[in-house]
Amino acid sequence: MKLHIVLTFGLLAWMSLGSVVAAPKSYTIGLSMYSLRQLFFDDKLTALDYPDFAKKTFGITKIDVWEGGFPKDRINDPKFYQELKARADMAGSEIFLYMTGAVDARGKTAKERKVQGKKFFDAVDKSALLGCTFVRVFLRAPNGDREQALKSSAEALRPLAKYAKKKGITIVIEPGASEWSKQGRFLADLAKLMDHPRLRLMPDFGKMKAHDPYGGTRAMMPYTDSVSAKSHDFDEQGNSTDFDYARLMKTVNEAGFKGIVAIEYEGKKLGPVEGVKATRKLLQRFQP
């Protein structure tokens, strides 16, 4: 009996230790397909080859996809998404997020606003075929009164969040597409107002540049499920010339974020591959 107890205790301790070791210490570095847009535009890379390319070139297996990188003649073909999912599986990669357009909340009536949200049901369906966890949208909030903008935005987004829940998908809003939605504090208040488990946020440092990316990121973190690491140019030490990345990533880490921080390189001085590698190296500095 004593031996059995000792062995059982030892097994439980080993299992407990294993679970602790398996838990991520910090965020995981992912890749946004948009970073490689020039390769797609120049026909140097295809959407189907993208998962394998990301793994072999950068060692990154958490990737998002962007509608602009898909072949136009197959964007509504379910077989294309099934094939892309199969290619990702073969590469040992996960397509965690599907990037689509902007939900327009500027309709004059609640009915018009709800219709706008429903237009993105197909993006949710496509993301489900790819095995995604998230669909990223922008938000076109109406100008003018802040409270009305929040109310109108919630009306447009609720049908989409409800539909996404049925499919096991979470909608994440990225700053951009309107003055209100470029502000992190506005999006944080919107997420709080909606209080929906399938409506979350995705800070993008670049999209908030004109409206305090530091305070905006901090405000968004309690409602954040994914982060977009925007980058353009770098100095000789490898630091971003646009943002204080140490400050931004400190905010991300202090919030206890353990999700995916996806590289979104938009610079022109470095090529797509070199730009992604420079951003990855920068992000690696701040992983605890």
Image: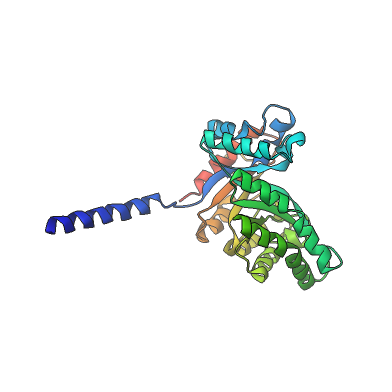
Q: Residue at x 22, y 54 (%)?
A: 10
Question: How is the model colour-coded?
Answer: rainbow
The one of 165 and 287 positioned closer to us in this rendering: 165
The one of 247 and 87 positioned closer to us in this rendering: 87
| 188 to 237, vertically: above or below | below
Q: Which residue is most to the top?
A: 44
Q: Position of residue 61 (x, y in %)?
A: 53, 39
**If the image is split into quadrants, where does the N terminus sit?**
bottom left
Q: Position of residue 17 (x, y in %)?
A: 32, 53
Question: Residue 105: in sight, yes or no?
Answer: no
Q: Residue at x 60, y 52 (%)?
A: 227
Question: Residue 157: in sight, yes or no?
Answer: yes
Q: Position of residue 91 (x, y in %)?
A: 53, 34
The number of callouts visible is 0
Q: Is residue 13 left or right of residue 239?
A: left
Q: Is residue 239 left or right of residue 175?
A: left
Q: Which residue is most to the left?
A: 2
Q: Which of the 4 image quadrants contains residue 9?
A: bottom left
| 19 to 32, vertically: above or below | below
Q: Position of residue 268 (x, y in %)?
A: 71, 36
Q: Which of the 4 image quadrants contains residue 112?
A: bottom right
The one of 224 and 105 positioned closer to us in this rendering: 105
